């Protein structure tokens, strides 16, 4: 970083490169700083439930390293076997189990960073509070625009004594969405609450035989955890809510093997798409839970109009949609259609009171959509905050904030946003 | 709610016109940290629930709403916000700006995790929004977390969207002579494990049968909710969680009343003599922690330590408030930094 500073060169940090918003994509000729060789778990404190790791440690490797203490690292993105903790910090990554436990920022206590000028700092710490600003919270999710993490202290979560995983089978997608609202309204925040529509359910079932009903219009995968009595009561309530909303079937995994199989189906969904089309474009947007039904309907209509097959597999419990557009990039004119559909989906979500991204980040992909949710004054403050961390503007330039964010900066049509 | 929106604009205009601004809530936490600025224009955020749909588990409120009023509204739908100020007459905005987490932090997480969206008046008098209305969001930088604990120095909070949670079926306090460490090993996700050196007091929340089973496993006997230590001079220590036993012994030695949050590292302290609070601060520093003045102790420095990463923190403040007009002196920044004891 010091060498990059001496030569006044921009830089981009890169972990495993699993990011979906292009945050680690080099634009122009930046120095690319790869963290994948920094793979040590530096220390584990099972009493205070804290681990220090290097940024290149893979998400799943961290949970494996602490499993024998009865602990895990809670955020579990679908790419957890391949993505790095450093990348998770950069994007404030989520995952199915973040519904109850919160996304990455709630699990990161301290970050050793190298700032753009080559100086080092520890943001946050192991004390419960520090005087002044939560610079740690600021850095998490900043997508490499505020510096590079070289060490991360994460909070570890004790394994729950009781876990139940349920598969709910619906003949109509509206019923599944209404069940999501019903579960929350009943006062239950499950550990995970995932929805898959008819198309993806069939694809996944063909791919790995997870035991999903091939003829369902939608399935919900619900996991509750905690203590035995509370978990049993939640399972009963969820079954009642589901039946009241027309669920055809309610199945609770009988053992760990069945539970693992149900999750395998969910987590291999994106890989399974290869059976349908060679390419896919995965979206990430969040809407208020109460608007799920209408937004899903609109997404189906938009895709039908452009004749793009769409599949929905997403974190229904927190309204985090992941419409997946399947296509063949060799087809002439397909990129334009996919982009039109993507833009329309984003607009739909914003109009429903949603946001641009729940867990993938803004990166390059959504940079130029930022003005859909933020006004000029909002963007100006974000730009000033970024400049406070990186006055020379060398940390992952051209990401997150569109050109013209700073007040007085000359706006112009940005380039290279579409990847 | 047009009233709240109109009032927000009035706040922004007042901030724009003033040379020095003193954001105020109910005044329940006025003595936390650095002293409030003198010769400053007081500004107050509007009160009122702007939007609340229980099925979304979020609520939008004017920052001037008291926590008591907010919780009363949420309770009608069987929900709450995990704000937990020591005095619920505090406003939502004041609670967030002060940034002090409540006694249930072990279970619900720090205060900053409860905020989804902030709207605030900038030093120039613009109304700016950060974060977003949904429970999950990575759209842009995390301004909500940055503003929590900023003591009004980055902007005047006018409206916020908070995360709600279902009220637990049962909330039960029990106590035991067993050590906090043993209790923590015996309980799953307790809401609080408090110790004053004599008794360990535990808050269990959840299904009634689970609470009973946990209480039996940990040998807990029902008790009243513990009171924070009281005295003319109060503070809170942030210490490494593993040092609480040693720190408690040192505070006993000094004759300081204390209540420690086990597994968190926060220790609430109170004394009747200002000198003693200064000595408690010394004990905190000795274990690698620090003490924030919360009430009384007018001669004690508010924080007693410089801000970590002072130069970066100063650049952040200047980015938000170039002339240093917002709540000057509340954080040890700028000129005030040189005066830190």
Image (tube, rainbow, N blue to C red):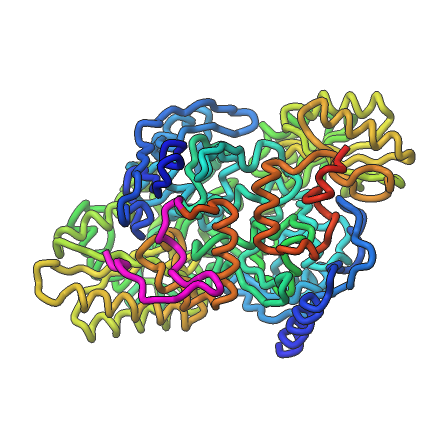
Q: Nearer the viewer, residue A173 or A100?
A: A100
Q: Which residue lies at the image location 52% right of the left edge and 33% below the top edge?
A: A121
Q: Nearer the viewer, residue A369 or A324?
A: A369
Eyeballing the image, is A49 above or below A196? above
Q: Which residue lies at the image location 62% right of the left edge and 64% below the top edge?
A: B124
In the image, A76: left or right of B19?
left
Q: Position of residue A38 (x, y in %)?
A: 35, 27
**Which residues fall within the magenta stretch?**
A394-419
Task: Using the rendered image of the protein, determine whether residue A130 is visible from the camera's viewpoint.
Answer: yes
Q: Position of residue A249 (x, y in %)?
A: 31, 58
Eyeballing the image, is A367 above or below B218? below
Residue B74 appears in which quarter of the rendering?
bottom right
Q: Which residue lies at the image location 29% right of the left edge and 38% below the top edge?
A: A16
Q: Nearer the viewer, residue B53 or B173?
A: B53
Q: Quadrant of the C terminus of chain A?
A: bottom left
Q: Which residue lies at the image location 63% right of the left edge and 67% below the top edge?
A: B125
Q: Position of residue B79 (x, y in %)?
A: 61, 59
Residue A310 appears in which quarter of the rendering?
bottom left
Q: Within the magenta stretch, is there residue A221?
A: no
In the image, B64: left or right of B146?
right
């Amino acid at each position: 970083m010091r060498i990059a500073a001496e030569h006044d060169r921009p830089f981009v940090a890169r972990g495993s490169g699993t990011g979906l918003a292009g945050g680690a994509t080099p634009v122009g000729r930046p120095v690319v700083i790869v963290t994948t060789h920094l793979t040590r778990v530096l220390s584990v404190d099972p009493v205070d439930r804290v681990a220090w790791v290097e940024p290149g440690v893979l998400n799943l490797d961290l949970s494996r390293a602490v499993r024998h203490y009865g602990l895990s690292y809670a955020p579990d993105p679908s790419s957890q076997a391949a993505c790095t903790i450093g990348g998770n910090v950069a994007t404030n990554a989520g995952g199915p189990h973040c519904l109850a436990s919160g996304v990455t920022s709630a699990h990161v206590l301290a970050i050793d960073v190298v700032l753009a000028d080559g100086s080092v700092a520890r943001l946050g710490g192991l004390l419960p509070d520090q005087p002044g600003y939560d610079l740690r919270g600021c850095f998490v999710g900043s997508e490499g625009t505020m510096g590079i993490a070289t060490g991360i202290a994460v909070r570890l979560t004790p394994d729950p004594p009781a876990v139940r995983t349920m598969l709910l089978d619906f003949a109509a997608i509206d019923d599944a969405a209404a069940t999501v609202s019903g579960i929350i309204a009943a006062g239950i925040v499950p550990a995970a609450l995932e929805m898959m529509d008819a198309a993806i359910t069939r694809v996944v079932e063909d791919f790995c035989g997870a035991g999903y009903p091939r003829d369902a219009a939608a399935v919900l995968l619900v996991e509750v955890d905690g203590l035995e009595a509370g978990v049993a009561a939640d399972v009963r309530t969820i079954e009642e809510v589901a039946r009241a909303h027309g669920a055809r079937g309610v199945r609770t995994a009988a053992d760990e093997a069945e539970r693992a199989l149900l999750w395998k189906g969910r987590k291999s969904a994106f890989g399974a798409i290869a059976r349908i089309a060679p390419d896919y474009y995965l979206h990430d947007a969040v809407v208020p839970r109460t608007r799920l039904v209408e937004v899903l309907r609109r997404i189906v209509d938009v895709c039908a109009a452009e004749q793009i097959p769409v599949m929905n597999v997403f974190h229904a419990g927190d309204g985090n949609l992941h419409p997946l557009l399947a296509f063949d990039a060799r087809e002439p004119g397909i990129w334009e259609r996919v982009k039109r559909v993507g833009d329309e989906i984003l607009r739909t979500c914003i109009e429903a009171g949603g946001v641009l991204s729940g867990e993938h980040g803004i990166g390059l992909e959504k940079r130029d959509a930022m003005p859909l949710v933020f006004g000029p004054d909002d963007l100006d403050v974000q730009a000033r905050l970024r400049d406070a961390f990186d006055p020379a503007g060398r940390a992952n330039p051209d990401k997150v904030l569109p050109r013209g964010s700073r007040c007085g900066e000359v706006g112009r049509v940005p380039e290279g946003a579409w990847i | 709610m047009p009233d709240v929106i109109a009032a927000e604009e009035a706040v922004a205009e007042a901030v724009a016109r003033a040379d020095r601004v003193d954001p105020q809530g109910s005044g329940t936490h006025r003595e936390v940290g650095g002293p409030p600025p003198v010769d400053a224009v007081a500004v107050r955020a509007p009160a009122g629930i702007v939007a609340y749909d229980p099925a979304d588990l979020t609520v939008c409120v004017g920052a001037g709403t008291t926590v008591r009023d907010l919780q009363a509204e949420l309770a009608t739908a069987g929900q709450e916000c995990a704000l937990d100020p020591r005095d619920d007459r505090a406003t939502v905005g004041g609670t967030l700006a002060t940034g002090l987490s409540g006694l249930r932090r072990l279970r619900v997480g720090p205060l900053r995790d409860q905020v989804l969206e902030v709207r605030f008046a900038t030093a120039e008098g613009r109304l700016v929004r950060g974060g977003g209305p949904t429970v999950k969001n990575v759209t842009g930088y995390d301004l909500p977390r940055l503003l929590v604990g900023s003591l009004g120095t980055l902007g005047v909070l006018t409206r916020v969207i908070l995360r709600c949670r279902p009220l637990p079926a049962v909330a039960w306090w029990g106590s035991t002579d067993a050590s906090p460490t043993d209790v923590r090993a015996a309980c799953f996700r307790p809401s609080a494990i408090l110790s004053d050196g004599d008794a360990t007091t535990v808050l269990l929340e959840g299904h009634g049968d689970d609470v009973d089973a946990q209480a039996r496993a940990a040998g807990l006997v029902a008790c009243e909710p513990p009171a924070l230590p009281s005295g003319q001079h109060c503070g809170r220590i942030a210490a490494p969680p593993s040092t609480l036993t040693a720190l408690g012994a040192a505070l006993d030695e000094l004759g300081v009343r204390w209540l420690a949050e086990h597994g968190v590292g926060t220790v609430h302290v109170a004394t009747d003599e200002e000198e003693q609070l200064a000595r408690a601060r010394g004990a905190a520093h000795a274990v690698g922690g620090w003490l924030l003045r919360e009430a009384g102790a007018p001669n004690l420095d508010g924080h007693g330590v410089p801000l970590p990463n002072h130069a970066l923190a100063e650049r952040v403040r200047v980015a938000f408030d170039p002339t240093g007009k917002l709540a000057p002196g509340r954080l040890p920044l700028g000129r005030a930094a040189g005066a830190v004891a």
